[in-house]
Image: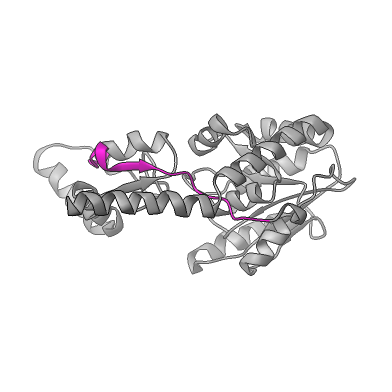
Amino acid sequence: VTLHEVYDQFPGVFPRERITGGGALLKIKRFCYDKRHPLQTIFRNHCKSNFHADKVLVHYPYQIAIVKTWGIAGENIVCIALPAPEIAPDDFAQTPPRPMLHLGSAGFINPNFDYQTLFAVLDTLPMQWRFTWIGGVRRPEDQSLLDAICATVRAKNWPDKFKITGWVEESDQARQIGELDIYCAFFTARSASSSLMLAIANRRCIVAADLPLVRAINAAYPVIAAGAGAELLAKAIVALSADQKARARLIDGCDKYAREHSYSALAKTILAQYQSVIRRRLS
């Protein structure tokens, strides 16, 4: 079993651990919580049984400690980094930013991306810019968020500067990410990101919010310029746009990550894990 979403507390849901009360009242509150949050209830039960799996895979070292607190046995946990798609070197250009800085992000419109911080960053940039969100809405409940984003874009008079493509094919998404000068990953919560892996595969300069996921990637590969809050994120973008050596360091880090954590490399690692399970089962 592979766990792509690993958090101390899952975003968007009130933590069960913070339910207050005592005695019968606490039991009633937890019972009501479990009924109203069936996904979290089922997940907890699976954790107690190690998902009935011989191995539970996570993507980053800090997540091992988290899943142990869920009750998953330590000897069953394996850490395998999320891979980057294999994109030929000819498909990306290590060129300096253009006079009109092209910023962007990719994926589904979702509440775990900090759009207010994004707007604040764009408001303060001293250079000319345009921004492209490569993706659209996946769930009907996110339509109101998209509507709010579009309303803000209209209010700021950015219709020619801020574009949302809507859903695009995976190959086209990769191509459009490759056209960005700087990829913006302003997540409020994220434990694994396929769109971030696409940015790394395209050897883009990445500016991201300072999250455990970002720190875990940077611990091994200097691929992301991280900052907490709009001011520091804006400064990181300005600095990268002016510093060719800094851009080169990030692009080189992306190249190393993409080469060492390709899908081909992942397949060999996963195969070895299956073989170890089979040997143990047959012994």
Q: In front here: 73 or 190? A: 73
Residue 118, horizontal then vertical, whole percent? 67, 45
The foreground one among 173 and 132 is 173
Front residue of 24 and 238: 238
Instruction: Locate residue 191, reporting x and y percent.
Output: 46, 44
The structure residue drawn at horizontal position 43% and vertical position 44%, both measured from the top left corner, is 80
Q: Position of residue 6 (x, y in %)?
A: 39, 44
Residue 34 drawn above or below residue 144: above
Q: Tell me the magenta residue range.
A: 69-87
**Residue drawn at 75 percent across, 56 percent down:** 91
**Front-most of residues 78 and 49:** 78
Is residue 158 placed above or below 250 in the rendered structure? below
Relative height, residue 85 to residue 247 (above, below): below
In the rendered structure, does residue 199 fall within the stretch colored magenta? no
Q: Position of residue 268 (x, y in %)?
A: 45, 52
- The secondary structure that most of the magenta stretch takes on is loop
Residue 159 appears in the picture as rendered = yes
The residue sitting at the left extreme is: 24
Q: Quadrant of the N terminus?
A: bottom left
Residue 111 in view in this figure: no
Count of labels shown? 0
Tell me which residue sits at (52%, 62%) in the image.
142
Query: Which quadrant would residue 236 be assigned to in this image?
Result: top right
Left or right for 256, reference 265:
right
Left/right of residue 173 with respect to residue 271 in the rendered view: right
